[in-house]
Image (tube, rainbow, N blue to C red):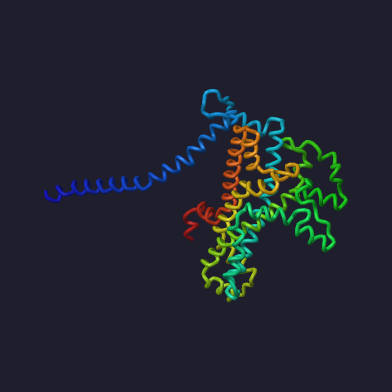
């Protein structure tokens, strides 16, 4: 009887303790939830509502007189044959070239720098790590202004090329793509009079000649700047992952007769796969959000060859006072980033583990 009488008391005390832990947990979490709701979730919902209206920035977007247009701001970016769609597709084209060039370049450069500063026989490791990382902590606006001076018509790069007898391009004046310049330099096409077969029929209001232009010289300058300033941060990520690799694995591979490239391919890179996925994901997200370098260096010029969706969203909303279309562009950009990040995760998934899960249990045991 005594034992049966104490059991309910223990269960009651256990439930009381759990409820107290839950209350304490919610007390600690509540400030974060409130802050995230007020400063992130609520502004996102407000921007989503603005993207469904034709608000011009006058007064409150939630008043009764603001026209509600539904998804017209979204469909107009893809279906309406006007300047807004042309600008949006031009920005998408420019950003595709930007992503395709920046993400691989900064990843390879960061990995190479990490391998260099991780060498045990390297002298002055601290100096080189600091030197490689320093551009990443420098203000992007200051670096952008510096590159403007360096790549101007009378800048250091132009004078250096002239010293070797090379005529430098008009860095921020020539709107032709590098592929156009290359083909015209080889005498295959005339960039001023493109082939008639490529001057029309392209998707989303742009001709095939415009889609196949390649990045402009100005965009290539921005690409060089971004690769230089971002590789240091990713270098630290790779360096931390390299230092977590056991030395015994490298020594074992050396005893097995593996060379330097074989150790890199079969030992180092497989162990760096989680870090590589992180670097590629962060690089993909950042390259689709590029804004400050474009704002400082080119304002989308020349001839919209450096226009990006992030800058177009800003310009549409705060300069053209079309806040609905500007917000719609930002949400389309968000959707593009989510889809590409999910696709990248699917491509870099661990196929061995997935295949092992699909095998029958008997085969796995054997």
Point out residue 155 in the picture as x, y percentages from the top left corner: 76, 57
Residue at image location 55% in from the left, 29% down from the top? 59
Q: Can residue 265 be seen in this view?
A: no
Given residues 63 and 121, the one toward you in this image is 63
Check the image and report above or below for 301 versus 355.
above
Q: Can residue 175 be seen in this view?
A: yes
Point out residue 2 in the picture as x, y percentages from the top left corner: 12, 50
Outermost residue toward the left in this view: 1
Given residues 17 and 130, the one toward you in this image is 130
Outermost residue toward the right in this view: 187
Point out residue 261 in the picture as x, y percentages from the top left corner: 65, 68
Check the image and report above or below for 311 versus 162.
above
Point out residue 203 in the picture as x, y percentages from the top left corner: 73, 37
Q: Is residue 200 left or right of residue 65?
A: right
Residue at image location 79% in from the left, 51% down from the top? 170
Residue at image location 67% in from the left, 47% down from the top? 294
Check the image and report above or below for 12 versus 113.
above
Residue at image location 49% in from the left, 61% down from the top? 366
């Amino acid at each position: 009887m005594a034992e049966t009488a104490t059991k309910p008391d223990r269960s009651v005390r256990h439930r009381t303790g759990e409820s107290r832990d839950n209350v304490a947990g919610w007390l600690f979490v509540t400030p974060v939830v409130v802050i995230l709701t007020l400063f992130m979730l609520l502004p996102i919902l407000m921007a989503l509502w603005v993207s469904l209206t034709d608000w011009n920035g006058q007064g409150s977007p939630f008043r009764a007189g603001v026209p509600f247009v539904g998804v017209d701001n979204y469909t107009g970016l893809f279906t309406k044959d006007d300047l807004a769609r042309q600008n949006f597709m031009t920005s998408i084209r420019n950003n595709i070239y930007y992503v395709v060039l920046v993400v691989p370049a900064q990843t390879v450069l960061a990995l190479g720098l990490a391998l260099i500063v991780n060498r045990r026989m390297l002298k002055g490791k601290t100096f080189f790590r600091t030197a490689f990382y320093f551009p990443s902590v420098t203000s992007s606006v200051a670096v952008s202004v510096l590159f403007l001076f360096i790549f101007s018509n009378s800048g250091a790069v132009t004078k250096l090329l002239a010293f070797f007898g090379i005529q430098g391009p008009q860095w921020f004046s020539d709107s032709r793509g590098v592929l156009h310049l290359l083909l015209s330099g080889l005498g295959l096409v005339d960039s001023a009079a493109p082939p008639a077969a490529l001057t029309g029929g392209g998707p989303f209001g742009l001709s095939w000649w415009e889609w196949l232009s390649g990045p402009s010289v100005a965009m290539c300058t921005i690409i060089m700047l971004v690769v230089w300033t971002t590789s240091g941060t990713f270098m630290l990520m790779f360096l931390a992952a390299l230092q977590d690799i056991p030395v015994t694995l490298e020594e074992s591979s050396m005893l097995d007769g593996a060379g330097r490239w074989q150790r890199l391919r079969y030992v180092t890179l497989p162990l760096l796969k989680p870090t590589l996925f992180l670097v590629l994901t962060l690089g993909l997200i950042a390259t689709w959000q590029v804004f400050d370098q474009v704002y400082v260096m080119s304002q989308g010029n020349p001839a919209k060859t450096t226009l990006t969706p992030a800058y177009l969203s800003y310009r549409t909303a705060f300069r053209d006072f079309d806040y609905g279309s500007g917000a719609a562009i930002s949400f389309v950009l968000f959707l593009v980033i989510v889809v590409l990040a999910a696709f990248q995760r699917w491509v870099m998934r661990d196929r061995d583990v997935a295949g092992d899960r699909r095998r029958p249990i008997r085969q796995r045991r054997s």
